Image (tube, coloured by chain):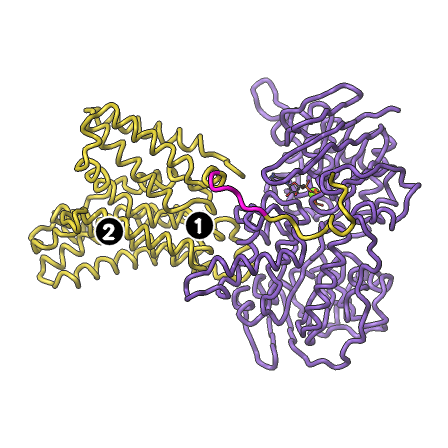
Chain colours: A yellow, B purple
Amino acid sequence: MSDATPSAAVAAPRRQRRSRWQRLLHSPMFFPLLGFIAVFIIMSLVNDRFLDLGNIQNVIRQGSVIGIIAVGMSFAIFTGGIDLSVGPVMALSGTIMAGLMAAGWPAPVAIAAGLCLGSAFGAFNGFCVAFGRMPPIIVTLATMGAAHGLALLYTGGYPISGLPSWFSWFGRGTLAGIQLPILIMLLTYAIAYVVLHHTPFGRYVYAVGGNEEATRLTGIRVPRTKMLVYTISGLTAAIAGLVITSRLMSGQPGIGEGFELDAIAAVVLGGAAIAGGRGVVLGTLVGAMLLAMLNNGLNLMGVSSYLQDVIKGGIILLAVYIGRGRDA
Amino acid sequence: MTAVLSLEQVSKQFPGVKALDNVSLTVAAGEIHALLGENGAGKSTLMKILCGIHQPDEGTIRLDGEPRRFTSYRDACATGVGIVFQEFSLVPWLSVVDNIFLGREPRNRLGLIRHAQMRAEANALFDRLEIDIDPEISVHRLSVADQQFVEIAKALSLNARVLVLDEPTAPLTPSEVERLFRIMRRLREDGVAMVFISHHLEEIFQICDRITVLRDGTYVDSCRVADTDHDALVEMMIGRRVENIFPPRQARAANSPLLLTAEIGLKQTDHTDSITLHRGEILGFAGLVGSGRSEFAMALIGAYPTRVAQIRLDGADVTFRSPADALDAGIGMLPEDRKRQGLILPFSCADNITLNHLGQFYRPAPFISRKQEAETVDAAMDQVRVKAPSAQTPVASLSGGNQQKVVIARWLDRGCRILIFDEPTRGIDVGAKAEIYTLMKRLAAQGIAIIMISSELPEITGLCDRVLVFSHGRIVAELADEAIEADTIMRHAVTEPRRNDVSHSVTEDA
Ligand SMILES: Nc1ncnc2c1ncn2[C@@H]1O[C@H](COP(=O)(O)OP(=O)(O)OP(=O)(O)O)[C@@H](O)[C@H]1O
Ligand SMILES: [Mg+2]
């Protein structure tokens, strides 16, 4: 049996690859996908309109704004942080775009300005967290209020309309038969996936979440990593701002309330550990779509919106319960 | 025989690893039983099964001859089994008493904690162990040794009749080990059955009565300590002889060029200390635990606040504001505490090893080529002989010694000019130790300068070209070549540094 020859006993370790199925079973995506499929089947059974191709595109489109925000939220949560300011930052970026366009600025410049503003806001969050060493939940709670106030100040509290008509393309247009918000969302996820899984920065994001002290001591610039993470979160909030402003064809200063909670829910439903270090961004996509599907399906079933909140809350709890402490 | 504890034909399968295959162990009352084996042999797993943390696939646990099945650690505790884990398990910010009674605090009728009772019981425990620790002090303010004693007190607090000590001596200095042994002898007189795990074989001969050896998850043999010797034990453990654990000492290239000089004063001190480091040299930092060796090294790479830090590297003045700056200049550090400061626990072995040199695998920048990464990782893991099912195995599921090897592997072929190794062989088995020493010598031969902080005197005397002895946060002596002797080092390590001699490395009698 294992009466190994003397030197073989300490020889090179055995290397073996896990089978595809085992890999899937152990991937953080497993339960999110399972939940997604389950809800999908239930929804299509109770609802004959649900499976309609048009309806499915609508579901995805409706989920795209939260979906885009949740990308940045994923980065923050993977590092063990959080970004509560995403909703108001989205609104602020959107109103700035609308305001500049209404004031006659060329649309590309206005859009760029909005995206920069969102990123700058995120960078400020990142600066406070990384170099000011303040807890992210407090920093972004403060900037959440500030961004909301700034958006209202800028607009005087009224929506801004009078945008150039082609601007609606981002929110209502299609490309190759697919609605543009969906394409923007998918593109955001694709880029985030590549960044997280194929660049050093992505690896650092998880490392910081997994053990910040060890990451620092081993020679990684942790503050720089965090700064970039919150900047990305600000940027994706601004992209969501572009989509929603274009969809509504007006800059709405008060929009986005509670979006941060939906985004956090999407990340957690996607199998990420709220303590950081574990999670995949494609899981977040699944989580965001699961939420959108629930919203749509429950609407079609005529469930009251109050009851919908209760059901969604229950499902989030259930998902976190099932996914808790796996392969710790 | 009065076997208090017997484990019979225990087997345990983890994904990809048969951790234990038909292993048996019997321990009598008042016996200290050594459990030996290489890293990953299954020692900790067997003990975790005994304590109800893992469930065995097969086999029986008997206490006093009665078969038991523990479903949780609490369950095992209640039956009189206590364990001191390989990794510390105290809550740093809680007091000593709160730690000892964590999760089973005595309550009064209103459900409030009975502090006085807890304190009294803690004091009684400390009296029994003859240790002097203030039960109200917060655990993070205790020395490592005292924390270890608190762990023991905690394990004993439910009148444990079986006590498991998983590598308790790894972070202790020789004199602290002596204290631990006094406590263990006292418990032996009380009739406590103990299982003792250690990679320091001389300790086995000092304290243990009987020995059981495991290899690759299988039972090899049991015998009385008196019936065996060091070499025979090593052969039982790893299946071959290890002739010379230290590579032969080569005459150091007499005046190899100066690489680094550093004058460092830590924050909140009023003195500075200086070191010099030459190319291809292994410089030892010796001293007691807490003598300021790690702090000095951390300050050198910018990981610890300093008041003065004048560093010249290769003739140029440099400032390191973070370990990342130091790494850019080619200085890397393997920290002392692998769990807290070294490993990213949710990561695989591979991701842990390549973490700080991902730039090597650009193809093209900033994208990493997974394939190249995998090749480098496999080579590094073979060099230090990490025992793992695959490079993609989560590092958290490796044995303690193999985790340590992963952290070491991170610094191989890294292109660093200076490597600082803080207790590099902590928790590593005899065979692998020899290999790591050879590895360090090879690095030095390539011109890399190594600073090795170690509490193991044989390691210091066997490996270092020059040694600085630390005491109370100061460098109190410098020894070179023949002067590097265990006795001399210990004599300096326990001396109080003189107040007046500031800012020079002391050149005392050899
Ligand atoms: N939770 C786990 N999941 C998967 N594999 C595990 C787990 N715990 C231990 N193993 C594997 O079981 C084997 C035995 O590990 P164990 O920790 O018992 O070794 P050990 O003898 O204590 O070694 P060391 O001297 O390094 O502490 C190792 O190959 C390890 O990788
Ligand atoms: Mg172990």
- Which is in the foreground here, disc 1 or disc 2? 2
| As drawn, B286 above or below A88 | below
* Mark 1: amino acid: Thr
Q: Tell me the quadrant of ligand 2.
A: top right
> Furthest residue to the right?
B227
Residue B285 appears left or right of B298: right
* Mark 2: amino acid: Ile
Image coordinates of residue B91 in percent, x first then y, are 61, 40
Q: Which mark is residue A184?
A: 2
Q: Is residue B121 visible?
A: no
**The C terminus of chain B lies in which quarter of the figure?**
bottom right
**The N terminus of chain B lies in which quarter of the figure?**
top right
- Check residue A18 for magenta coloring: yes
Give the camera-side residue of B390 and B307: B390
Residue A56 appears left or right of B4: left
Image coordinates of residue A138 in percent, x first then y, are 38, 47
Region rendered in magenta: A16-21
Quickly name the residue at label 1.
Answer: A79
